[in-house]
Image (tube, grey):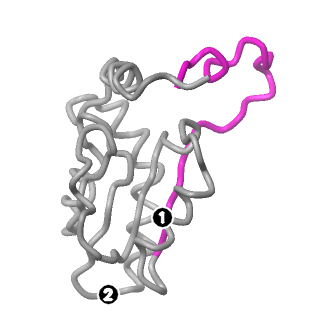
Amino acid sequence: YWLSEERERERYLLHMNSSSDSGYLQFLSRAVDPLVCALSNLGGALRGVDYGCGPTPTASILFRTHGLDVVNYDPFFFPDALLGDDQFDFLICTEVIEHLRDPREEFERMIDLVREGGVIALMTEVWDPSIQFSEWAYLSDPT
């Protein structure tokens, strides 16, 4: 069972992620900060992509404070961001992989987007064994 694209887009519009939310910025920094550290070895003007950035791109704002250029891509909200044959120095994908309909296809696309020697960072919620599987929030998320 899959939601229609319209219903899936509507569901993502309910997410309350914002660059004005310090808690969300702190959450994202758990992926952004280690990635910035790893990128320091690459040198030069680096360009990345926030893959699945959602309706209110936020990781790119954090990267820009470190002087890094980031393209915001999302199939529902920024679908034209990756129309060229560009390759990037890095890719970040936060809170997205648990929603993918075809993870293999998407992972292959992500790999193709990053130049050889580049870095891919993926982040999702870590499973908490104290939560009963039947009560896990992702189980009831229709996406």
The residue carrying pointer 2 sits among few (fewer than 14), some (14 to 19) or many (20 or more) residues within 10 Å by Cα, namely few
Q: Earlier in the sequence, mark 2 or mark 1?
A: 2
Residue at 40% over, 44% down: 28
Front disc: 2 or 1: 1
Residue on which disc 2 sits: 43
Among the 4 quarters of the image, the one containing residue 64? bottom left
On the image, the x and y values in percent for residue 44 come to: 25, 87
Compared across the picture, whether 96 is left or right of 74 comes to right
On the image, the x and y values in percent for residue 52 come to: 38, 46
Amino acid type of the residue tagged 2 in the rendering: Gly
**Tag 1 secondary structure:** helix
Q: Quadrant of the N terminus?
A: top right
Amino acid type of the residue tagged 1 in the rendering: Arg
The residue carrying pointer 1 sits among few (fewer than 14), some (14 to 19) or many (20 or more) residues within 10 Å by Cα, namely few
Q: Nearer the viewer, residue 41 or 46?
A: 46
Residue at 20% over, 67% down: 69
- Whether residue 92 appears in magenta in the rendering, the answer is no
- Whether residue 142 appears in magenta in the rendering, the answer is yes
Question: Can you say whether 41 is above or below 69 in the image?
Answer: below
Residue on which disc 1 sits: 109
**Mark 2 and mark 1: span between their CA atoms?**
24 Å
On the image, the x and y values in percent for residue 142 come to: 55, 19
Compared across the picture, whether 113 is left or right of 143 comes to left
Residue at 29% over, 52% down: 73
Disc sitting over residue 91 in the figure: none
Compared across the picture, whether 37 is left or right of 10 comes to right
Magenta residues span 119-143
Among the 4 quarters of the image, the one containing residue 105? bottom right
Circles 2, 1 touching at the beta carbon (< 8 Å): no
Residue at 59% over, 36% down: 125
**Tag 2 secondary structure:** loop
Question: For the image shown, how many numbered marks are present on the structure?
Answer: 2
